[in-house]
Every structure is written in C-alpha cells, then in structure tokens.
Amino acid sequence: MSEQVAFQHIEKTSLIGKRIKKPDAPAKATGKTRYINDMVLPQMLYGKILHAGRAHAEIISIDTSEAEKLAGVHLVVTAQDTPELRLGFVKDNAPLKNKIRCERDEVAAVAAESEAIAAAALKLIRVDYKDLPGVYTIEESQREGAPVIQERFPDNKSLKFEFKAGDLAQAEADSDIILDDTFNVHYVTHCCMGTSCAIADFDHNGKLTIYSQTQYPYNYKMDLAPALGIDPGDIRVIQPPTGGSFGAKLDVYPFEPVAAILAQKTGRPVKILFDREEEFINSPTRQPASMHLRTGCTKDGILTFRAADVEMDNGAYTSWGATVPVIMMRTTSGHYRVPVVDFKGQAYYTNNSYAGSFRGYGNVQMTYATAQHMDMLAEKLDMDPIEFRLKNAQKSGEYTPQKSYLRECALAECLTTAAEASDYVAKLGKYTDDRKAQGRYKRGIGLASSIHNAGGAKIHKSDGCGTILKMDDYARVTVITGASEIGQGIDAVIGQIVSEELGVPVEHVTLVNNDSDLGPWDVGVHASRTTFIAGNGARRAAIKAKKQILAAASKQANVTAEELDLRGGFVVQDKDGAVVTKLDKMLRQMHFQPEPDVVMVSDYYEPNSEPEGRDHISDHSAAYSHAVHIAEVVVDTLTGEVKVEKVTMAQDVGRVINRMGLEAQMEGGMAFGLGFALSEEMLFEEGRLQNPNFRDYKVPTAPEMPEIEMHFIESDCEEGPYGAKGIAELPTIVVAPAIANAVYNATGIRFFNPPMTPEKVARAIWEKKNA
Amino acid sequence: MSVKTELEFTINGRPVNIEVPVDMTVLNLLRDMLDLKGTKYACGEGECGACTIEVDGMTINSCLMMAVDLQGREVMTIEGLSKGNALHPMQKSFVDHGAVQCGFCMPGMIIQANYLVKKNPDLTREEMKRGLEGNVCRCTGYTKVLDAVAAVVGLRG
Ligand code: FES
Ligand code: FES
C-alpha cells in the first residue's frame, strides 16, 4: 500500500440521500448466493412432516411400524415421544400434536436419507382419527355449547384488547353524522419465494445450532427452547440468506422444533424444507378480521369519535397474528385527530389456520376501514375532500389519545403534495360526473392515508439493538449488528452510515449479522424499525470509533480532536480538509502509542420510547410517520376487472438515507397491498385450504404493476439517524383503501370486503344496475 | 428404485455425460446432481419462473422438463451467464438499478430478461411486462426490474 499522501485537501461530502447498491446483489444476480434452501451439511438427513389434513379430530391410534421398516428411514416421531413440549404466544401450540385442531397440525415426522424416502415413509404411517364437529367462523365459535378448541380456553376466547378515551355517549350526541359499517378483511399469505426451511444440528454437549429463516434471532432462542425442553443459552441461530420474509418469520413454527427433535434423537443434522403446497397450507396468514367501525363527525367536518369493535378469527393457535389490535387501535385513535375513542378487539379460537405477523401488522386491516370512512364522510359533508382531511389532520407537537407523540408530523404536507401532484380534486369531481355517462370503462381516483410507528415499537421492555464495530490495520471496517437482513437492505444502509461517519468507502465496510453467537441482542426485523434502530446503533458505534481515532491523532498532530475529521481514508483538518495522515497508517500507529490500543467499540441503542403497557397509553415508538397514496383506476364494468394505472405516493420518510433502497421498499410494499386489494385470497372450506398454489392464489405479476410517482417528505426526525424514519410498512398499508376509494369513485359501489376480484366487482355492478 | 439412463448434453458450454433417473426433472438434475443451485425451486409446477433456464436458446421452466429430454441439447443456467466473476450486462444492470432484494427470484428473472432482450433488442416496456409475466417476485414490485431491463435495451438501442 502506498504511504504517499495523494491529496493535500479533502472536501467534506455526504453519502446521505445517495443511491447505494446492495452489497449482496451481485452474488444473488449470478446465482452464487447459497440460500438456506440450497444448503446441504455432511451426514444430513431430510425431515418430513405428516400434517393432519383435517380440521378437528381425535387421534385414536398411530402406527408407525411400516414407516420405520422402510430402508433409509432413521426415525419416526409422534407426540408420544415429545410430551410436555409447548410453543406459541400463549403456549397453546406444540411441535407434534395428540389432538387435531386445524388442517396444519403436525401428527408425525420422519428423518430419512433422502426427501423421496421421507415422503414415501409418511405414506406408510397409519393414523386412525375420530373426526369432531368443527368451528369455522367467529359466529360458530361464540355459540352456546360450541365445540371447545383449546381445553384451557373453554369459552373459545383468545386474546383481548381494549382502549377507551373520552365520553363516547357525549361524542355521539355531538355528532351530526355517524357512519356505521362492518369491514371484513380476508385471509392472505406471505408467499415468500424461498419456501420455509430449517436445518437443525446438535453437538455432543447438547448445544443446538439451528439454521433458520427467522427475522427475530435472539427472541427466537427464547421461543424455541421450551419447545425442546432445553436452555435458550444452548441454542445458536445461524441465518443464511433467505428468500423473503415480510413478517412471516417472527413466530416460531412447529416445523422448526420438529427438525430439532429429529436432529437431537438421530445425532445427525436434519433439514426440513417445504414444497409450495406445504408452504401455502402450513404457513401463517395475515390476521383476518371483522371490523365494526363507527365514525362520528360534526356538520363542520370535525371528527368527534371513532368506535371500533374488532373480532378476529384466531384459528386453532394463538400467534403474533392475534396481537395486531395493538397497532389497529393506534390507527383508530390516530390517523387524524380523534378526541374520543372506543376500541375493542377480541380473538376467537376456531378450527381454521392461524395467522402470523405480516408487513403492515393490523394496520393494513384497520386502515382499509378508517380510510374509507374518511372518504365517505367527505362525500356526505359535500366538503372538499382535502380540506376535510386537513381540518382533522394532526400537526407536529400533538399527542394522540394513546399518547403517541407526533414530534414531527407531516400528514398535511403528504396530503397536499399527493393531491396536487395527481390533480386529485379535479379528477374526483370529473369521474363522479362521468359515472352517470354510458360506457364500459369507468375511471376513478381514490385517496387514503395512515399513520404507522416509524421509530420501532416497544412491545418488549427493550426495543434496542447492539452493535460491535472494529477496524483493522488497513482501515477496513467490520460491523457486527444484531439486526437481520431478510432482503430489505440493511446491509447497504449500515455500510452507508458507517462510511459517512468514518470516511471510508462503502465497499470497505463488512456486515456480520447472521450468527447469534457473534451478534449482540436485537429484537428483530419488524415494525419498520431496522434503519431507525440498527442505523442509529451503527452510527453511534462509528462515532465512538471516530472519537477514539481522532483522540489518538490529535496527540500526534498537536491539535485538539475537535479540529480533526475523517474523510476519504485520511485524517484531515476539519476546517479546510488539509490532510494530516492516512487513516490506515493512523490505525497501525495506535498499536505503538504510549497506551497501545485497537479500534473496537460497542454500542447498545435504546430508542426514546415507552413500553406498550396493558392500558395501551404510552409513546411506544420513538417516531411516527404518515403516508398518502392516491390510486387511479379503470374499472371494466363488464368483466369487473380493476386496473390500477397509477399510484401517487407521498410519505414522511424523515430523511432519505439510501434513495434506491427506499424506492425499492415503496414499490415492493405497494405491490403487497395491491395483491391484498385485488387478487389474493386464501379460500377455506371447513378449515381446509382450497387454493394452495400460484394458479389459484394470484399474486401480482409485472403486467399488473401501475406507474408509480413518489414524493418523499423530509420532516427531519429528531431521534432518527440523520433525521430518518422507518418506512417499509406504510406503502403496504395505504394502497388498498386508496384503490377501494377509487373503485367507489368509478362505480359508486363500496367494497367493504376485499379483495375486489373481477367476479365480485362485476356482480356488485350487475346487482346495482338491477336493483 | 427408479430406472436410469445415460445422457449427453452441454451445460454452460461444457459437455456433460451423466446417468440420471428417468423420472428426474431438469431442475432436480441441476440442483441435486450438478451442484448448479443458482436455479431455484419455488413452486415445481410452472407457475413462478424461479427455475427458468435456457435450452437450445429458448427459455423453459426447468421444473416441468424431464432430464431425459436434454439429450443432445445445449443448456444455459444463471451460472453460465457471467464470465468468471465478471457480471453479464443484464446482471450488472439489475445490481445497479436496485432490482435485487431477497434475490430468490432473480436467477430465473434475469435469464428470462436476457432472453427477451436477445430475441427483441427494441423491447418496449409493455413487452417486457408481458415477457416477465411468468416470473413471480414478491419483494420488488417489478418496477426496478423493468428499469434494469430497460437500461440494457437502451444501451443496445
Ligand atoms: S419452480 Fe418452476 S416455475 Fe416455479
Ligand atoms: S427479490 Fe425477493 S422474490 Fe424477487
């Protein structure tokens, strides 16, 4: 390496807001990346699970003897071999079942020398069932004398949530308009392109190494341990690259402890990998909900109250899915100024499949209702729809009734920016008039907005993230962070932030974040928290390292550390960029100074937020953000097809960090909402999924994608890294109600129950015409 | 155990001579016997495009083709698109445009995109959309994918 100083002066530049490439993209684009699905370990066995395929039954007997005799089969296990082991949010689930409560239930598992042998062995297992009457709707679950799903919950009631503020009776009396509607949101699923997979391997000391797709590695240990009867400290989680996640990997699912049980008992690594049909049937769904929403308003267009009574189909087991009211109530009590709130959420056990967490987490459901009510109120009031929303829009410095503190609130700016960019008000009026005209194709425009946590969500006592940063003698930086990468791009963002602070090229920053034995604590990828929390952590660690380097350099240069800076791989004078020394040289010299040292720092960043308490009154996120989407659609009134032509987005992002990654999250997030709104729906009959394939479950493909126009509002969040806020869920949340409002504008028909499939839309148009 | 047969074909420019079970798909042959794991399984029934490869210059879903049908043919997988560690222009364009997130769909997507551009160097955005309809991506919403392909078309056009 040349020790010559190439430049005399280096100007201060910034990477914040620039387009940074994902460092792992070349390997992914060339097929070099080894996903967990691709991994093979020496001596590895293949595990396969026998799922019940029926919704409610007693197991009379299981005969595994024929399966055990098959050549290449190493082990067959059933619930008999694993009594006492529990998992799940309220520990109502088990790795293997002795009673069937839903189609997904795991009856037995096989470890064999190949997938084909394991599959053949499953066919040889004889199970005698006695089918029981099932419960497939919330109504059936509530019925007097309904079959009990979980013995511990004889009334079939699972989690319950409540929040009240203000005097509801008074608010009702003060209202000139009260809307009262029920919205039913359906079952959709994540459809990660990489199907579910786990590889478990025990060592001779009883320590489990599990290769997992989890997006929650540190809590994962705690959740997995009771399902295995081992200490969480004896679990090492390795996260190889994974083919998508989107919330699906927040819970631990039975197949993971099953893989571990097979590994423990055989002494061999065991891999369980789902095929697509298994993936559809046995993966989590978005939490379906029936939301009875009432919204009140004065004739001057001032909101008076929101009352939401949400009933949820819990399915057979309680997961993170059923906790979504925690966010639903923030939307009910926020997302415009709502002085009086009455929120109730109750989950009911049924024999259906069970949900998990899913990008948008309750807010996709609730905003589908609240944003349509805002639209309906504006129409009823005959008020300019933007003026109506602006009247009620919260402003910086306000609190919500749940004490969410909106330190920087850009809702008004999002509204006016998106409305102006799309010529919303004029088009809305024109398309309303056009509705009466003849013609097969009708145009519509619709606006929706929402609020979401944008500085983490303190659902645990801590919402923090640990970071370890070290620099080597060549000024290469290694950042070990607790934050996981699931495709969203934290690798690029952390590289960018560290590069910004330490004045080294982004390519010289290596991220290590796939091994729980190395990484410090973090509470996982969820709640749009990673750029905010892990980004802040990485920045703080880099600043600490910089201080240490500049302190050492200041002694050499005989100036104060404050007068120095790091730029372009050099230590420079802050004021004019005059080069003092090369950074790598400085790092080496630090070993030889009077008090020898090495640059290796750590940080634990805890956001400035309050834990979500039982009363749900707390500032549970360090920041909140708003977004507005305006959808422009064309409805074919003959076929019922809704084509979304354009979506104009305005979102408060705090500050743009990686512009390319930000855009990518907006586009991908929106696509999820588009599928939810128009085409995706899991169809169940008596608890059994009828469409477990991509032919009958339609995810959006390239031709369905609308043109997208994005506006980033930079509100400069005081607590966020460089002012940034978390961003990744809002695009999924707001697009569906924007489309619903646009379809209304085009057809005059409200769709309270998504998805707006061609059949449903065509039927509604036909019924309206013939009414 | 299944009956086996001997096959000869070329893969990424190299001749292969291998004995394969007659009921094996091309996808499984690539992944399990030839260690070419760049080609992905995501549905196994021709509905997602993750397993897309080129056979005799045409793209196919390798999960639907039987290995025995490769006799005498020329196969190109994602591993054959780049030369050593140098990215193919299509791969580079995907990287530069931020079109890669989890990346699981990308080998199939890039093979298909490259095929479309080879076939029609003046591809329009609408034609790209239709040409990529069979390739599901759950992360990107396709916009950056289309931008990446458009940039390659622009370069050539
Ligand atoms: S795996 Fe072949 S098309 Fe999906
Ligand atoms: S990048 Fe994840 S599925 Fe396409």
Image (cartoon, grey):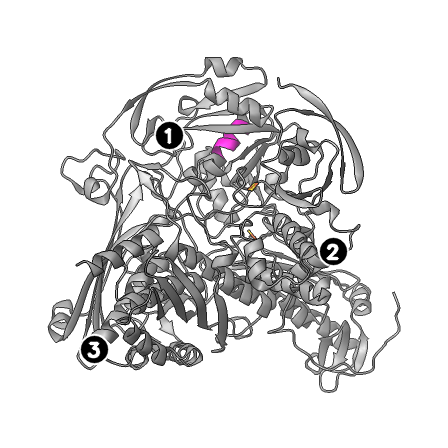
The residue under the point 81% across, 75% down is A581
Up-down relation of residue A548 to residue A58 (above or below): below
Give the camera-side residue of A672 and A62: A672
Q: Residue furthest front?
A: A438
Which class describes the residues within 10 Å of circle 1: few (<14), some (14-19), or many (20+)? Answer: some
Q: Are marks 2 and 1 on the same chain?
A: no
Which residue type carries mark 3?
Leu
* In this picture, residue B65 sits left or right of residue A131: right
Give the camera-side residue of B14 and A139: B14
Q: Please name the residue that numbered disc 2 is placed on.
A: B88
Give the spatial CA distance, label 2 vs label 3. 58 Å
Q: Position of residue A544 (x, y in %)?
A: 64, 68
Secondary structure category for the residue under label 1: loop
Q: Position of residue B70 (x, y in %)?
A: 70, 33
Which class describes the residues within 10 Å of circle 3: few (<14), some (14-19), or many (20+)? Answer: some
**Residue under mark 2: which chain is it in?**
B
* In this picture, residue A656 sits left or right of residue A302: right
Secondary structure category for the residue under label 2: loop
**Residue under mark 3: which chain is it in?**
A
Quadrant of ligand 1: it is top right
Which residue type carries mark 1?
Gly
Q: Please name the residue that numbered disc 1 is placed on.
A: A53
Q: Which mark is residue A621?
A: none
Quarter of the image with the N terminus of chain A is bottom right
Q: Please name the residue that numbered disc 3 is placed on.
A: A381
